[in-house]
Amino acid sequence: MPIALAAQSTAQSDAIPAPALIDELLPVLAADSLPRLIVLGSDAALAAVLTHLMRTERLHVEVGYVPLEGTYGAQAYQTGTGNAAAKRALEGSAEEVPLVRDDTGTVLVGRAKITGVDGAHLTGEAYVDDTRLFSGEVRAMFVTPTLELPGVRASVPRRFRRRRWTAGRAAQLGTPAAVVNRDGVQSDRPVPRASFYRHHEPWLLVR
């Protein structure tokens, strides 16, 4: 527990908070004159909280993020880590940032890695808005949210060359079979397509 949060009311949860626990916290927040929910944990934990807030139409809740170590989400949203992130979450101001979700209705806050089955190369075709990202076979496809609009960026590894990101409102992939890892959580089964796009509402990030 970062020192800055030691005096705050807390609720313990699994590594990925259950919707029922989030529902228990929301009335408590509503009764507070300065309601703010701070997530201490991983990108997957923050994604679970934001997914529930999106599905229950509660994106007006201010959310602070305190990762204990560097994560893709901490990098994307420039939150810092540990006690520095905790101070931001307590003292910072909320600002609207793009909310990125996928076609399963799950929020992405850090990074999605898409590969072929069992880690094999990925075969298919992908676009970011109207720009073709690749067609054919690549080692993997990566998707992350951005702090600023348009909200989504995607890339594929390129041998001996620096990775180049393509930004847009949506990244879409069609493939014979792919496995999607969202914020460290892998999909249960291969899928023939995957889409990540900016939700019509932003979320309120405290930073």
Image: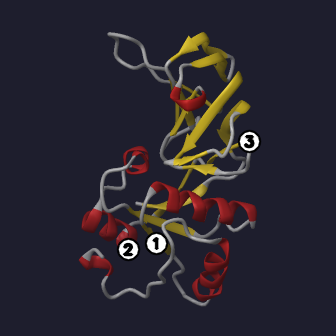
Q: Secondary structure at mark 3?
A: loop
The answer to whether 30 appears left or right of 39 in the picture is right
Q: Position of residue 76 (x, y in %)?
A: 42, 44
Q: Secondary structure at mark 2?
A: helix
Q: Nearer the viewer, residue 22 or 97?
A: 22
Q: Nearer the viewer, residue 117 or 68?
A: 117
The tag earlier along the polypeptide, 1 or 2, is 1
The tag earlier along the polypeptide, 1 or 3, is 1
Q: Secondary structure at mark 1?
A: strand
Where on the picture, by quarter, is residue 204?
Answer: bottom right
Q: Are marks 1 and 2 in contact (CB under 8 Å)?
A: yes
Q: Look at the image and tell me whether residue 90 can be seen.
A: yes
Q: State the separation of the CA atoms marked 1 and 2.
A: 8 Å
Q: State the separation of the CA atoms marked 1 and 3.
A: 26 Å
Q: Say which residue appears at 38% left-offset and 86% top-offset.
A: 8
Q: Say which residue appears at 47% left-offset and 55% top-offset.
A: 43
Q: Are marks 1 and 3 in contact (CB under 8 Å)?
A: no
Q: Say which residue appears at 36% left-offset and 72% top-offset.
A: 91
Q: Look at the image and tell me whether residue 173 can be seen.
A: no
Image: 5 above or below 43: below
Q: Say which residue appears at 43% left-offset and 59% top-offset.
A: 42
Q: Which residue is label 3 attached to?
A: 103
Q: Position of residue 125 (x, y in %)?
A: 67, 16
Q: Which mark is residue 38?
A: 1
Q: Position of residue 62 (x, y in %)?
A: 54, 68
Q: Which mark is residue 90?
A: 2
What is the tally of numbered marks visible in this picture? 3
